[in-house]
Image: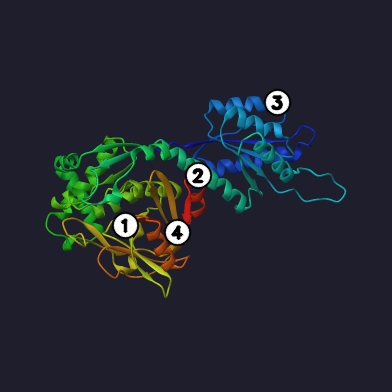
Amino acid sequence: MKEKLNVGLIVTLSGRWPRELPEKRLGEYTAWARENLEPEMNLTMPEQVLTTPEEVHEAIRMMRANLVDVVIMVYGAFTGDDIAAAIVQKMGVPLILWAPYEPPYEREERLWANALCAMTMNAAALDRLGYGCHTVYGGREDERASGKVMRILRSYGVKKALAGMSLGLFGYRPTNYYVSTFDEAAIRRTFGITMNATELKSVFDDMAALDAEEVQSDMARVSARWDPAKLPEGHLENHSRLYLALRKRMQLDGYDFGIIKCWPEMGAAHTQPCAVLGRLLDDGISIGCEGDVDAGITQQMLMLLSPGKAPFITDMIDLNEEENSMLFWHCGNAAPSLHNPAYGPELRNHPLVGQGSAFWTALKPGTVTIARLHNDHGQYRLVLMHGEALDRDRVTRGCMVSVKMTAPVRETAERLIEERIPHHYVVVWDDVCEALKMTASLMGIPVLEL
């Protein structure tokens, strides 16, 4: 279960500065936090502007009692180094220094805030004390400032959520897929994720034990949305049984996300899971395919950064240098929310070996981020690309999307091969590049941006 980030927000000033502007900012920025951070995050916000050591001590006590993970310090007006230093030293949590813009100047009036100067001074002082911090300049109404605050908080939220998650392994890896091997100690050390396993036999047993009426009900739902006529006999029932069984098994075993060995055993049982995995993604349940744990962690990270947007685990299979596009394809695991209705998505047999259910469809156009976590001999790296998914029909069986890339495609593909990056990538229809880079930096993961 995803743990919410606990956020503290305080507004500060040094005592000699007038209180009218800080009081106004206290109301504005606490209202901003309630509107933009709740209910995604838990908030702790003192009801007064902090000035004196006693006020700061009481705010720290309150935030510690509420297990605050990150503190936002908004400059009501100029603030000395003492409050920022007290926060980092006594709480030991990340600190975001946020300096709003100055109010309009009047020639004969005093300076009312001097927040940028204070933030510059406080950040330098924290560095001398051996502490880091994040800095944000601009008002809450400026997306450059408020958007940066949101990216920082969501990145800490992803880090916290992953560290509280359990990854379920359904089987190990497909035959001869050495790139799907994984380092459990490195995963625990880097992300805090715990791992446990469920044998595929348990999944097959769960499928067989399902109530017939429940299975028939799901088959009817599937048939109402996709024409199952081109599926071999028995494959629709296997599809529904596997879909229901995996949903229940994830909950029963307490897994937050999973990885499955999807062949050869599942194919031998005529229940290749591609379309099932796509449907589960639209339910918010991430189960990565082909035993690729690192791709599965990438997919879960993208789901946390883009709530409600299903990612797509895929292969890069071709380049078009004239239009600078890459063709991404996979067997049929794309979530229905990604299908392009203009090209008639179909529920069919597995496109290569048969023996299951898969979606044959082109995917929708739009801005995309493409990512891959890669264990490079014990040290994780994040590969990051971006582009625009094109409105194109499929050219072969399975799921596919052509992406017009930002960087030159041939150089990008050759670099991926030279860096020995495995063949699975994860595509999400969202621009989360900056948030991904921030999240990686919080975990000490270097980024290879192409």
Corner quadrant of residue 92: top right
Could you tell me the amino acid type at mark 1? Ala
In the rendered view, tell whether residue 321 sits above or below residue 111.
Answer: below
C-alpha separation, residue under disc 4 versus residue under disc 2: 20 Å
Label 2–label 3 contact, CB within 8 A? no
- Left or right position of 19 against 450: right
In front of the other: 5 or 25: 5
Could you tell me the amino acid type at mark 4? Met
Disc marking residue 334 = 1
Can residue 307 be seen in this snapshot? no
- Left or right position of 146 against 392: right
Of the numbered discs 4 and 1, the one sitting upstream in the chain is 1
Could you tell me the amino acid type at mark 3? Pro
Chosen colour scheme: rainbow
Could you tell me the amino acid type at mark 2? Arg
Disc marking residue 154 = 2
Residue that appears at 88% across and 48% down? 108
In the rendered view, tell whether residue 445 sits above or below residue 425.
Answer: above
Of the numbered discs 2 and 3, the one sitting upstream in the chain is 3
What residue is disc 3 on? 53
Of the numbered discs 2 and 1, the one sitting upstream in the chain is 2
Measuring from the top left, give residue 87's x and y in whole percent.
Answer: 62, 31
Measuring from the top left, give residue 113's x and y in whole percent.
Answer: 76, 43
Residue that appears at 30% across and 51% down? 179
C-alpha separation, residue under disc 3 versus residue under disc 1: 56 Å
C-alpha separation, residue under disc 2 versus residue under disc 1: 25 Å
What residue is disc 4 on? 385
